[in-house]
Image (cartoon, grey):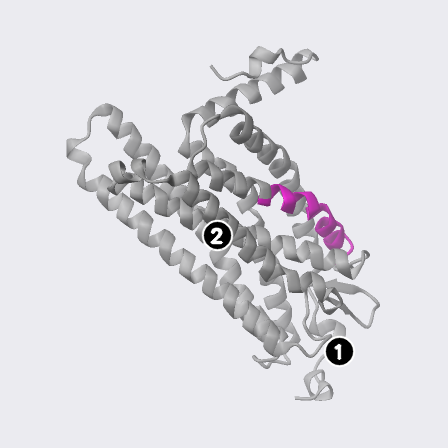
Amino acid sequence: MTNSTRFENCNEKQFYDTSEVTYTVSAIFYSVIVLVGVPENVAALYFLICKRKELTEAKIYMISLTVADLLFVTFLPLWIDYYYRRGNWIFSSFVCSLWGSLFYINTYNTIFFLAAISFIRYRAVSQPVTAAQSRQIVRGSVLTALIWTLTVCFSLPIVINHEDYLFKTNTSNERCFESHEAKDTRTQVIVMHMLMELGFVLSFVVVITNNVLILRLLSAEQKALRTSQNKFKTRASRLVLMVLIIYTVSFLPYHVVHLLWTLLVLNFWKSDDCAFRKTVNDVHHISLCLMCTNCILDPILYCFMTTNFRQYLKKLRLSFTRKCLLGRSPKPQEIQLS
């Protein structure tokens, strides 16, 4: 299909148009993510590194999750500026591709690490003796290195081919990661996105399977549990629920919508209906917003994995409140864990 045929019913600007309200809502939403996500993840990283001396497999995964989240929210103000300017990227193509690569690194690190956490939690419930005797730290370190290597290598071509990810409209606005029309890379792009979808589906299957098995095991042992064990079951059930919420709220809508959006942008799914394409663009941006919620949901996950982290956050919040109300700096012992 030629460009003249494709744009017969609408001009080029309309073909990639997004509602003004979507840009406004997205800019506000990302601002909230930054305001909440930065202090939340800094507090989580401080706790994981400084407050817990013992190194476990789960802790290795949580540190990696937090580092990826911090890298992402640090660059998120650039995206806020992009939406504030109604889809006009004023920075270089390299910065655009760098932000995009961090987006993919954060997304798939989180997806794979949550799958790993679900697996080790299932082993801890189903085979507590074997899990305790296994070389968890070695396995965690090796798997963490593999996941980071995979996601970084996957994102490296984006940085190398950075000029492919900026698209200039006929109004001189430059769109970042909103089109793949500038270069003849349709096959390469669709293969990359299909691999992304496959990675999500496989990890989602792992998460669903392990968490369903955990709930079944805990339910089967319900009658034999003592009071202290009941508390463990409640905490484990909340952990399962939190992981499922992160997947279904943050990742599932994006991967469903993004597949349809990619097929439409690459013209595998042909449509000259600008109103329809605009709706798909709007929904795609909303799914991106939902995806970014994992940066503030991940630290909540840690609360269900350790009571010490909840105590740490409580004392940190109380200390901050005293500082704001009394206008003084908190004493060191006020933020120490008991």
Q: Position of residue 254 (x, y in %)?
A: 53, 59
Residue type for callout 2: Ile
Kindly identify the residue that appears in the image at 38 percent across and 40 percent down.
Answer: 136
Left or right: 29 with respect to 77? left
Residue type for callout 1: Asn
Left or right: 17 with respect to 132? right
Residue 111, numbered circle: 2
Quadrant of the image containing the N terminus: bottom right
Query: Which class describes the residues within 10 Å of circle 1: few (<14), some (14-19), or many (20+)?
Result: some
Q: Position of residue 185 (x, y in %)?
A: 66, 76
Left or right: 53 with respect to 228? right
Query: From where the camera sits, is residue 291 visible?
Result: no
Q: Main secondary structure of the magenta part?
A: helix
Contact, mark 2 vs mark 1 (Cβ under 8 Å): no
Q: Position of residue 186 (x, y in %)?
A: 63, 77
Q: Earlier in the sequence, mark 2 or mark 1?
A: 1
Query: From where the camera sits, is residue 149 visible?
Result: yes
Left or right: 22 with respect to 89? left
* Location of mark 1 (residue): 11
Query: Which class describes the residues within 10 Å of circle 2: few (<14), some (14-19), or many (20+)?
Result: many
- Tell which residue pokes out farthest to the right in this image: 172
Kindly identify the residue that appears in the image at 64 percent across and 52 percent down.
Answer: 102
- Depicted 204 relative to depicted 127: above or below: below
- Tell which residue pokes out farthest to the left in this image: 224
In magenta, the rendered stretch is 68-86
